[in-house]
């Protein structure tokens, strides 16, 4: 399938990927183009900036969660019909698992999808040395996929000379620059960027960024490279050999099969949809759109509600989803909404099936420490307190040993992939599941598992855990509300 596409990758975290990607999306949309955005890896926040611009969900592409054909299938299904797809990379271009492989890196995604890459080089405080950095990236892998370079945070006076040097000596196309400007940055907090709705005059800032990029980037050059992307094809001997160079320590165990299209879709006997309540507001907003879409394809009617603002759960629901977000920033409001806390606790006590991840798991505790340092009463379905720490806890991708376990009453036949990204911890994190980091060998016990509950810090991507999603739906189907 011929799908015009480009990846914007950085030489390191903080290179300006999100700002430039968001500005480019706005610029292309202003030209009347139908644009689809993607984010490499499991990040929740960067796609919110993309979606703020293009008006439709940005999609995660994660090469740890899916096999190569699965990645290509997810990409193609969302990219079909768009004029161009823009993929934002993660961390530095070659940075992968464990800090010493390219596994699950932007480079791996570019290899799986055969996507041309524009490398963003933060040139602040450099001139000729920037060319040496680019040369290193070009030489590190023979199939680097790098088709062009953008220089970020450099002077308009330096760019013409740096462009001439780079193109003459490295034979790589320079596609413009971004000047040093406070407007060209988005504020951050401990889990990444601040939420889009928290940034004052975000749309105005994005509009100004797009206008600036229209003057300093070679947009026609970017479109030409994107339009020249090769067709998306299934795995062949040739690209399988290329992928073997992407540092897969244990490919068979670490990558799941893409089985979503083969799922047995549970349906009510009378043909009715299965009503699932999904927490979605300023406190709970870390949601993979593909997770929700998969549940819909399996017969779910998704009903959103706000633990911050609504007083009780929606009526006649057969399941509950509590995903992550920033509940610690809204701990006082969540605690003050006692009727909602009571409603959720009573429903869980009555057997309402529930999946809760990270922030949603914290909300289920008896108490949660807010960002303000105060401890607030929460739902009380999990004993103990969720509390903040000064560093990331058990950060990164995880392999969950779920093979042979009963989850939501169904026996799971395979292990599960997940990831964790949180500064908070729990007095009662659960011990039902053995979790191991795929690189480095660190391991721990985690999660609460029962016939009606799966709760803990790990985030699941359902295309990488289809049996768990199906088990949840089957349990919801049998719940009588």
Image (cartoon, helix red, strand yellow):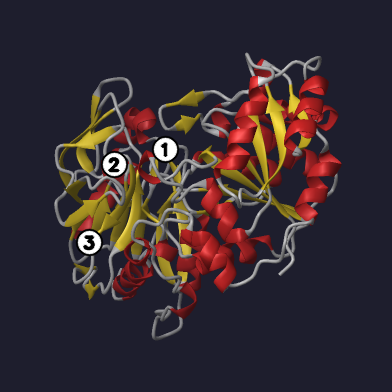
Question: At x 20% / y 47%, what residue is drawn?
Answer: 443
Question: Which residue sits furthest bottom?
Answer: 269
Q: Relative to the observer, which residue lies in front, 378 or 92?
A: 92
Sooner in the amino-acid sequence: mark 2 or mark 3: 2
Dot 2 crowding, Cα within 10 Å, few <14, some 14–19, many 20+: many
Q: Relative to the observer, which residue lies in front, 52 or 250?
A: 250
Residue at label 3?
401
153 vs 257: above or below: above
How far across and how far down the image is residue 78, in percent? 63, 61
Asked if marks 1 and 2 touch (Cβ < 8 Å), the reply is: yes
Is residue 235 in view?
Answer: no
Q: Which mark is residue 363?
A: 2
How far across and how far down the image is residue 135, in percent? 63, 34
459 vs 255: above or below: above
Cα separation, mark 2 vs mark 3, equals 25 Å
Cα separation, mark 1 vs mark 2, equals 10 Å
How far across and how far down the image is residue 35, in percent? 73, 51
């Amino acid at each position: 399938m011929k799908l015009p596409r480009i990846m914007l990758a950085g030489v390191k975290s903080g290179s300006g990927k999100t700002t430039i990607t968001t500005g480019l999306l706005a610029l292309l949309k202003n030209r009347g183009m139908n644009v689809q955005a993607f984010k490499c890896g499991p990040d929740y926040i960067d796609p919110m900036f993309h979606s703020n611009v293009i008006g439709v969900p940005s999609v995660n592409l994660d090469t740890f969660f899916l096999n190569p054909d699965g990645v290509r299938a997810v990409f193609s299904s969302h990219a079909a019909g768009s004029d161009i797809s823009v993929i934002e990379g993660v961390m530095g271009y070659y940075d992968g698992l464990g800090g010493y492989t390219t596994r699950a890196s932007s480079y791996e995604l570019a290899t799986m999808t055969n996507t041309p890459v524009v490398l963003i080089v933060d040139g602040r405080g450099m001139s000729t040395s920037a060319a040496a950095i680019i040369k290193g990236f070009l030489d590190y892998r023979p199939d680097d996929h790098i088709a062009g370079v953008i220089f970020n945070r450099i002077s308009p006076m330096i760019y013409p000379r740096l462009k001439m040097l780079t193109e003459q000596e490295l034979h790589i196309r320079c596609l413009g620059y971004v000047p040093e400007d406070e407007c060209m940055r988005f504020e951050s907090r401990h889990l990444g960027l601040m939420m889009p709705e928290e940034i004052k005059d975000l749309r105005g800032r994005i509009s100004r960024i797009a206008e600036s990029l229209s003057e300093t980037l070679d947009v026609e050059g970017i479109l030409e490279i994107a339009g020249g992307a090769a067709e998306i094809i299934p795995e062949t001997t040739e690209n399988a050999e290329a992928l073997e160079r992407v540092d897969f320590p244990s490919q068979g165990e670490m990558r799941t099969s893409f089985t979503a299209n083969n799922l047995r879709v549970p349906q009510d006997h009378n043909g009715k949809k299965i009503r699932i309540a999904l927490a979605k507001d300023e406190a709970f907003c870390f949601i993979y759109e593909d997770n929700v879409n998969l549940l819909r394809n399996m017969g779910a009617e998704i009903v959103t509600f706000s633990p911050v603002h609504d007083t009780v759960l929606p009526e006649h629901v057969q399941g509950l989803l509590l995903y992550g977000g920033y509940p610690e920033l809204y701990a006082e409001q969540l605690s003050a909404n006692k009727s909602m806390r009571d409603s959720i606790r009573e429903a869980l006590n009555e057997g309402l099936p529930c999946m809760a991840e990270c922030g949603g798991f914290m909300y289920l505790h008896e108490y949660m420490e807010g960002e303000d340092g105060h401890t607030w009463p929460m739902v009380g379905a999990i004993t103990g307190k969720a509390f903040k720490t000064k560093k990331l806890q058990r950060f990164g991708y995880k392999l969950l040993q779920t093979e042979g376990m009963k989850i939501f009453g169904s026996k799971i036949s395979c292990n599960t992939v997940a990831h964790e990204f949180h500064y908070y911890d729990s007095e009662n994190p659960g011990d039902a599941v053995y979790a191991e980091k795929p690189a480095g060998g660190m391991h721990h016990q985690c999660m609460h598992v029962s016939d009606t509950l799966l709760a803990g810090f790990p985030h699941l991507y359902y295309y990488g855990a289809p049996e768990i999603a199906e088990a949840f739906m089957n349990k919801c189907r049998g719940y009588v509300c």
